Amino acid sequence: MDPEPFQALPEEWERALAIVAHPDDMEFGAAAAVARWTGQGKQVVYCMVTSGEAGIDGIEPDRSRVLREAEQVESARIVGVDVVQFLGLPDGILEYGVPLRRSITEVVRQHRPEIVITGNFRDTFGGRNLNQAGHIAVGKATLDAVRDAGNRWVFPEQLGDGLEPWGGVTEVWAAGSPDSGHGVDITDTFPAGVASLAAHKAYIDGLGWENFDPEEFLEGFARSTGTRMGVPMATGFEVFAMGWGG
Ligand SMILES: [Zn+2]
């Protein structure tokens, strides 16, 4: 039996905020979708909860942080994202909980997006590929923070000085979830997505994966996801509707 076809994600929105644990998280799948949206004139802002400073075995964190932030800024630029915010929380030991929710809530209140994008935060990527603790913590905290942001009695110390509650996020989209039911046609913007991943050069070199080719890597996922939408290439997302009703 064929799997259920993916529905196309809505495109009647203007502002999205992507919140992920590490530099490179957007580029392992979602960046080509971002390129499509920015090409339509939408605004997308990136927020990195950590700077991925614990991500390269051969480079100690102080140096790695600088390299990885620079690679992320360039990688974002390639897909039309001009604002990349780094929260500077510690890489590798993020915990789901109130402090993380507080940090993310503040970012949601600052940017006032309609759509929030995050990475897959299910236990696996499908099959036996286990997800990583930082991704799970950030995804779960992001869902909560989107609700916290609209409640003036939650983290009230953030309010004032121009910061107001923001309850305008209609949906949270988790890229690459094994429970995806929606997709984005990335056929035209796939090359931008590849270039965006290739910009993480120090990271890719540091992985030590023999002959890693960003294009080949991304193409396999994009084509198999594309078949679920009836297009050559697509990226899958799990949709979480925020608020009640609707
Ligand atoms: Zn990551």
Image (cartoon, rainbow, N blue to C red):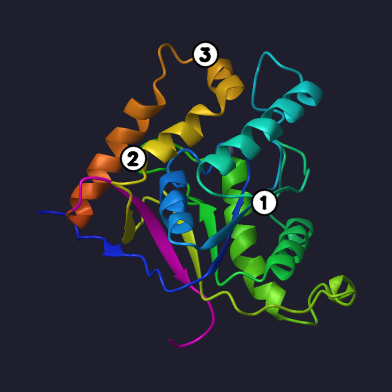
The label nearer to you, 1 versus 2, is 1
Residue at mark 2: 127
Residue 239 lies, in percent from the top left, at 42, 65
Tell me which amino acid carries mark 1.
Val
Badge 3 density bin: few <14, some 14–19, many ≥20, Cα 10 Å:
few
Tell me which amino acid carries mark 2.
Gly
| Precedes in sequence: disc 3 or disc 1 | 1
Q: Is residue 132 visible?
A: no
Q: Please tell me whether mark 3 sits on a helix, a strand or a loop.
A: loop
| Precedes in sequence: disc 2 or disc 3 | 2
On the picture, is 31 further left or further right than 56?
left
The label nearer to you, 2 versus 3, is 3
Instruction: Residue at 77% x, 25% y: name it.
Output: 61
Residue at mark 3: 208
Q: CA distance from mark 3 to mark 1?
A: 30 Å
Residue 160 lies, in percent from the top left, at 89, 77
Badge 2 density bin: few <14, some 14–19, many ≥20, Cα 10 Å:
few
Q: Quadrant of ligand 1?
A: top right
Q: Which residues are magenta?
A: 231-246
Is 238 part of what is drawn in magenta?
Answer: yes
Q: CA distance from mark 2 to mark 3?
A: 24 Å
